[in-house]
Image (cartoon, grey):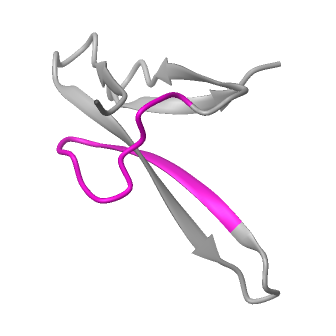
Amino acid sequence: MAFSVVSKKSGKTYILHLKAQQRPGGGVTNLYYFAGEKKAGALDALPEGYMVIENERTGLPMLKKKV
């Protein structure tokens, strides 16, 4: 089952996804994003060392690294 978060502001459910982006130098950057529907790249769990916060103005969830 995919990791999901419900927005406190809108009540809409968002699902966490991962996209591996190839960089010109040969490295790979992991891009985490939330989407309203399940697509390819949906994650089953929150990545290690991250927490979910919500933008107060828009109600959209975001990942933030733990301190």
- Quadrant showing the N terminus: top left
Is residue 57 shown left or right of residue 53? left
Left or right: 8 in relation to 63 = left
- Vertical comparison of 62 with 21: above or below: above
Extreme residue in the bottom direction: 24
Image coordinates of residue 22 in percent, x first then y, are: 64, 79
Q: Residue at x 51, y 20 (%)?
A: 53
In the displayed structure, would residue 3 be above or below residue 17?
above
35 in relation to 4, above or below:
below
Look at 73% across and 26% down and name the residue there. 49
Dominant SS of magenta comes to loop
| Residue interval drawn in magenta | 29-46
Q: Nearer the viewer, residue 25 or 54?
A: 25
Q: Position of residue 40 (x, y in %)?
A: 30, 59
Camera-side residue: 24 or 47? 47
Q: How many marks?
A: 0
Quarter where residue 20 is shown: bottom right
Q: Is residue 14 magenta?
A: no
Residue at far top of view: 8
Residue ID at (56%, 56%): 31
Quarter of the image containing the C terminus? top right
What residue is shown at x 68% (from left), y 29% (from top)?
A: 48
Residue 42 on the magenta segment: yes
Expressed as whole percent of the image width and height from the top left, the position of residue 62 reads 49, 32
